[in-house]
Amino acid sequence: MPADMEIPLTFSQRMAQEGKTLPFPADSPKWFDKATNEKIKEEMWAAPYDARFPQQKKQRMCFTYFVDYNRCKELKGEDYAPCQFFKNVYMDVCPRFWVDKWHEWVDEGRFPARFDR
């Protein structure tokens, strides 16, 4: 990844920045409008398809992207912007309590993966 590439914000960061939770009410017929959905698709970002994880189960994907982010941070440094891509993926895909627990394990030195390789 080039160091100067633009890394999009996570879904929750984008919603917080715009100050809203949903683009329109949940019972709105706009949810089924093709033009509206195309416009929303351009505004929203989702992690691209990763051939390493072809199935629907995301547990392994969460763990792998968390490890990839920490390895990138360890090897390239805290300020290396492309590392943010890995963080954005695991922040969007993984349940928050998993991430909190993994950070706790990293701080305690009990995390089951090494970040220096």
Image: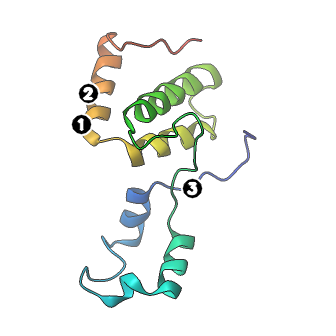
Q: Residues within 10 Å of mark 3 (few under 14, many from 20)?
A: some
Q: Name above or below for residue 9 compared with residue 99.
A: below
Q: Is residue 19 left or right of residue 85?
A: left
Residue 105 versus residue 53: which sits nearer the camera? Answer: 53
Question: Where is residue 102 shown, x and y percent of the image?
Answer: 32, 25
Task: Kindly identify the amino acid type of the residue bearing the numbered disc 1.
Answer: Phe
Q: Name above or below for residue 29 compared with residue 14.
A: below
Instruction: Evaluate if marks 1 and 2 touch, with contact meaning CB atoms under 8 Å apart.
Output: yes
- Residue drawn at x 56%, y 20% as measured from the top left: 74
Task: Kindly identify the amino acid type of the residue bearing the numbered disc 2.
Answer: Lys
Q: Name above or below for residue 105 compared with residue 3.
A: above
| Image quarter of the C terminus | top right
Question: Quarter of the image holding residue 31?
Answer: bottom left
Secondary structure under the numbered disc 1 in the rendered image = helix
Q: Which mark is residue 8?
A: 3
Q: Which mark is residue 101?
A: 2
- Residue drawn at x 27%, y 23% as measured from the top left: 104
Question: Quarter of the image holding residue 2?
Answer: top right
Q: Residue at label 1?
A: 97
Secondary structure under the numbered disc 3 in the rendered image = loop
- Residue drawn at x 54%, y 80% as measured from the top left: 39
